[in-house]
Amino acid sequence: MKKLLFLLPFLGLTVFVSAQTNGTNTPAKTSTAAKPAKPAAPKDTSLCSKRWDLIAVEEWAVESKPKKKQQDDYLWMTGDGKYNLKRNGEAKAGTWTRTGAYINFTDDASKEKFTYKVESAEAKKLKVDYHVSDMHTLFTFEVK
């Protein structure tokens, strides 16, 4: 506790000094001119151009093989922001974006929006959490 009380003034001083510089040890500019917009981040393509076939479904902490209507389910994303998938036997196609661990999909036909949270991603295995209302379903995909 004594160490924390001793370090607290230094933390405040560090924050104050950091706010006064732009990271190059020179005073920060106080210009009111608009800053140029940052270029858009390149689309994350690490999961793209692979056909991810569904191999397992987990609901209520019970993992099982895909049900009959899920036998041919898959996910396919391309680097230009397009996707095709089959979920519960229903085909969907549209656009996707990625924000951190979340892949956000918009279906072209219905304009439905849905999200997969990436739980783990490896070269040939992908696990995502699909959340609807109070139900979480974990889908495990594999590149074959």
Image (cartoon, rainbow, N blue to C red):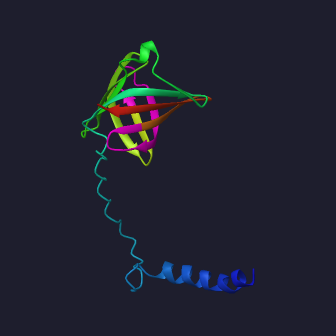
Residue at image coords 35%, 33%: 142
Percent coordinates x, y for residue 119 in the rendering: 47, 42
In the image, residue 130 above or below residue 109: below
Quarter where residue 23 is shown: bottom left
Residue at image coords 37%, 38%: 125
Relative horizontal placement of residue 141, taking residue 135 as reference (left or right)? left
Observer-nearest of 7 and 136: 136
Residue at image coords 24%, 39%: 80
Residue 124 is a magenta residue: yes
Quadrant in which the C terminus is drawn: top left
Quadrant in which the N terminus is drawn: bottom right
Quarter where residue 95 is shown: top left
In the image, residue 71 above or below residue 51: above
In the image, residue 17 above or below residue 100: below
Percent coordinates x, y for residue 93 in the rendering: 32, 24
Residue at image coords 66%, 81%: 8
Percent coordinates x, y for residue 126 in the rendering: 39, 38
Kindly report the secondary structure that dominates the magenta region of the rendered protein.
strand
Relative horizontal placement of residue 35, taking residue 100 as reference (left or right)? left
Quarter where residue 49 is shown: top left
Residue 118 is a magenta residue: yes
The total number of labels drawn is: 0
Observer-nearest of 132 and 15: 132
Query: Which residue range is magenta in the image?
Result: 106-126
Percent coordinates x, y for residue 46 in the rendering: 30, 45
Residue furthest top as drawn: 68
